[in-house]
Amino acid sequence: MKLFAFYFPQFHQTPENSRWWGEGFTDWNLVKQAVPLEAEHYQPRIPYNGRYYDQADADTVAWQAELAQNHGLSGFNFYHYWFDGKLMLEKPMELFRDNPDHQLEYCITWANETWTRQWVGNPEVLIKQSYSDDRAVWRAHFDYLLTFFQDERYLKREGCPVLCIYRPELHSHLEAYLSAFDQWAQEAGFNGVHFVAISAYQLSQAETAQQNFASVIRFQPRIFFTAQRAESSALMRYVEPILRLLPESMQLYLGRMKAAHQRYHAFSYEALWQHIHQLAEQDAPQAYQSVVVDWDNTARYGKRARFFNGATPEAFGHHLAKLAGAEQRRGKEWLFINAWNEWSEGAYLEPDERFGYRYLDAVKQVRQQLDKDAANVG
């Protein structure tokens, strides 16, 4: 079984972020400013030895790749931002691609949402995801991704490069878009594209939105949060899957209304993991699970944050070993970890001042056990 960690590229400066959020802005600004919301609440999160790195530095990406490989990860799943020809936050992914010394595999998730000031409760659009129907724009997107697909380290399934899409239900020309990519991939010498739908929310027509995808990733903790809302409110259980299919502009407006009344909420880390185990036991063969190192988005949302109580490297390691072992026995070849470095959401494997390298050590132990189990079966 291969273990992939989602990789977040917001820790380097861009002209756009400087214009929108202030000169030199990166997510480190948010991480440093976070404050605890209750007793024993672990904020702010501080990188080990105060390493507030710059992802535009090739040495940073090299350090991350080596650290991940040495602790049992198979690779990264890079978030990719593309707005009809406009690239954002592409530097770390390109640095990884361009250094052949990195031995990790990798794949890409197109994070295809509109950017707004929603973090601060403001629906102002910063850069819109408009989903042009211009095939020349689609081709430009494919040609950019092809430079990654052609890398021998890029994750492939049956001769098809793996491409994940975060919110496929938002794409207004989805079927034609995927068909074009599949055709161009075949023309480039592949067997097509292995499309993966990220399942982050309950949808009233999930089968329709995901019918053109070979696989699905259950994205945590969003699936868990949705389940919690459904359990607490019969109305939300019925309404939310429908709302998630509304145009994105309407979803953003409703999000603003919700934010006006939202207060912070602490969840049980143990309850999250019980939900993940139960989902994995019941899930379809083409569905892959994701797990959460920890989650605490106080750095972004302040008093509207959601976080977990009870997250420790020991709890994470115990449950990761249980799930990964079960998934490997079920014949699943991938398991995804949220995340490598989502510091502003408290979801990171990278070492910090509180736990040092203990989360990474937990992954390494799981990797060793998975390899041992696979060898015994073989």
Image (cartoon, rainbow, N blue to C red):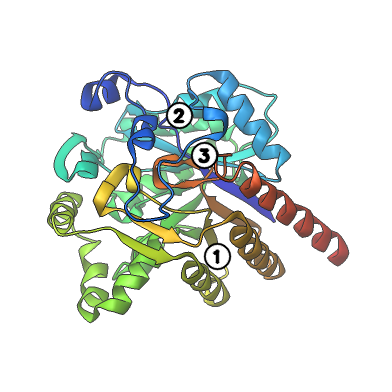
Which one is in front, 182 or 67?
67
Per the image, the residue denoted by label 3 is 185
Mark before the other along the chain sequence, 3 or 2: 2
Residue 251 is situated, as x and y percent measured from the top left of the image, at 18, 55
Q: Secondary structure at mark 3?
A: helix
Q: Is residue 25 above or below residue 359?
A: above
Q: Which residue is mark 2?
A: 143
* Labelled disc at residue 298: none
The image quarter in which residue 330 lies: bottom right
Looking at the image, which residue is at 60% across and 54% down?
A: 313
Asked whether disc 3 touches disc 2, contact meaning CB atoms under 8 Å apart, the reply is no
Amino acid type at circle 2 is: Asp
Mark 1 or 3: in front is: 1
- For the residue pair 193 and 322, the one nearer the viewer reads as 322
Q: Left or right of 318: which side holds 107?
A: left
**3 vs 2, front mark:** 2
